[in-house]
Image (cartoon, rainbow, N blue to C red):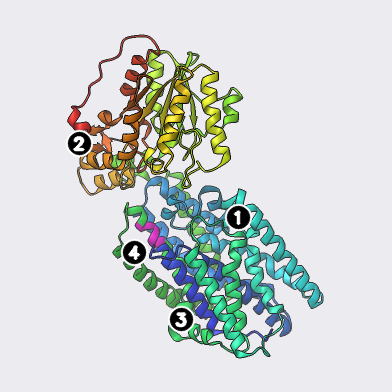
Amino acid sequence: MSQFKYRPDIDGLRAVAVILILIFHAELGLSGGFIGVDVFFVISGFLITGIILKDQNAGGFSLRAFLLRRMRRILPAAAVVVIATLVAGAFLLWPDEYVELSESAVCQQLMGSNFYFSDRTGYFEGPSDSKPLLHTWSLAVEEQFYLIYPLLLLLLLKQSKRHVCLILGGLFTVSLVFSEYWVHDHPNSAFFLLPTRAWELTAGGLLWFVPAADKWKPWLLNALSVVGAGAIVGSACLYGSATTFPGATALLPCGGALLLIYSSTPRLTWLGRTLAARPMIGIGLISYSLYLWHWPIFAFLHVHYAEVSIGARLLALVVSFACGYCSWRWIEQPFRKREFCPSTRRLLIASVAAPAVILLCAGVILLSGGIPARVDPVALQYHNSVKSMAFIHATSSARLHAGSPPLFGAEGGPRKCLLWGDSHAMAVAPGLDKACKDLGIAGVQATYSCRAPLLNFDCESTNNNSRSSRQCNQSVADYAIENGFELVVLAAIWAWYDDEPEFEACLKQTAEYLTGAGIRVAIIRDVATHKQHIPQQLAQAVIHKKDVTKIGLPMRDHRKNNRRCDAAFRRLTSNSVRVVDPAPYLVIDDIWRAEIGGVSMYRDKQHLTEEGGLQLDPMFYTLLSETGLGTGEVREVARRTENSTR
């Protein structure tokens, strides 16, 4: 292609990329706005290759000079953002969150934050909203690329142009194929790591070895630019958290970026002139700092508020732009223009001093366990309820039939009870475990998240939509019959499944299949699903001096949410099928309580904590005793009035 020169339209394309990301993170639409990062990768690969080729043609490329320029470009603004985030975290984060922030800060300084996050979270998972340095994964990918790619390209440039294209094209292909293969079985590492992202950066570099478009007709170049813009906008609108990404799906936004860059190479297309407009260039110039600052601002909002209003999100955008501009004007520019640290020696000293300060601060935070003395102990106790994860078992049919299923109840006691269900069954298991221990019996846990305990049931929004799920459920039912269980307890988030047409028929079929073999069945009505994250809501209530006993869901709302499944349960009830309601043990004054006795009953919006599960011990003790399992008299259970359960 033509010689390397300043391209105002590329600054405009940077603006498009960062705007897509901002809209996505502000939840203002564009479910696929995360593809802005992929556009950035293509731009980076294009510009870095152009710089190397320009220097090489001018008499020789200096890796030292290249890395020093990258240091001036990347490190100062990033260091300031990390330091500011650590300071803000002291006021806004819980100790465990502060520890995680410090760990990610250390990894960011070591250019390895993408490795850190690939092991700990998914980019689209809820908890990732509250990780203030999550966005530095993309910086780590580029930094790792900058260390490898220049050396590789210098070696290749000694070969013929044909060999350069073949080798770079081969690397592009290998990385893309690996990305497509890896993303299905290892989506986190495929999203975060360089080997599955390298093809995007390499694609930008390969553009320099494509024949120039000087002789192309203007209308054709304009058409190419429109196709490129459509590919970017289309992927931003159509992609989402359910999209398998990156892999082949990333070809659409990356291809769009390549077309926009290529089509404006000989002269700006009309879209290129739009991208080169002053407002777009302005946003493009501050795009790096804007990207750095926006995510910690949004992350701290998600940490502090269970639900972030649209007004707060819009304000966060304004603050992000202000911080981005200030960072560009008073940090980026002075370092790049050598107003700060003009000599290489001073730059290197600063490049050692800043990470040393960050690592020292992070070390103090890590060694102190997140400085817990900062936080109200009662609020901290509520916050820590998220860690209540007893009886979390994903039981496969192979594990059941291999004779090593997860057990509960009295150790060595006769196995009389089978708990079958999804994660809500896991959440009530502590109460069943305690009741079984008191009665001297044991049970087996057959649970799997998002899978209803129903035979021949399909549900498109959960794991109940595959042949293997049907086989697993059939295997659980057969296991119960073959091993002579006397009682099967079914528990699930029934409201997730009851809008499927075949729900009631499959429920009836499951009950009849088990009762036909002489097994009694108990269906546990679901616990309430609250509107907000309960531990966070309780902790914030303590901090703001509010009454935690008022936090909960009105029973009328809970009954409304479960009216379809409750109606199905009533029609199914018989001598062999009992329907058990946990409401009397968790409802006070017609409010399904978030806490009882100063203890959180929930670890999120819908799953009980271990303490919440133990609150159901009397319910299970009564069920087991009245069903004839175990020995001893039924304990006297304090019950609420019937009105409080409706």
| Separation of residues labelled 2 and 1 (CA atoms) | 48 Å
Labels 1 and 4: the sequence-earlier one: 1
Circle 3 SS class? helix
> Where's the C terminus, which quadrant?
top left
Labels 3 and 2: the sequence-earlier one: 3
Q: Nearer the viewer, mark 3 or mark 2?
A: 2
Residue, disc 2? 590
Question: Which residue does the image show at 52% across and 43% down from the upper left?
Answer: 465
Residue 126 image position (x, y, % from top left): 43, 51
Do the numbered discs 3 and 4 sit on residues whose CB atoms are within 8 Å?
Answer: no
Q: Amino acid at mark 3?
A: Met
Q: Is residue 297 magenta?
A: yes
> Main SS of the magenta segment?
helix
The magenta-colored residue range is 296-301
Residue 622 image position (x, y, % from top left): 32, 18
Question: Which residue does the image show at 64% across and 59% down from the upper left?
Answer: 196
Residue, disc 1? 190
Q: Nearer the viewer, residue 493 or 539?
A: 493
Q: Nearer the viewer, residue 330 or 122?
A: 122
Residue, disc 3? 280
Task: Count neighbours of disc 1 (C-alpha within 10 A) and say few if under 14, some if 14 to 19, many if 20 or more.
Answer: many
Q: Nearer the viewer, mark 4 or mark 2?
A: 2
Report the side of 519 relative to 646 (left or right): right
Residue, disc 4? 313
Labels 2 and 1: the sequence-earlier one: 1
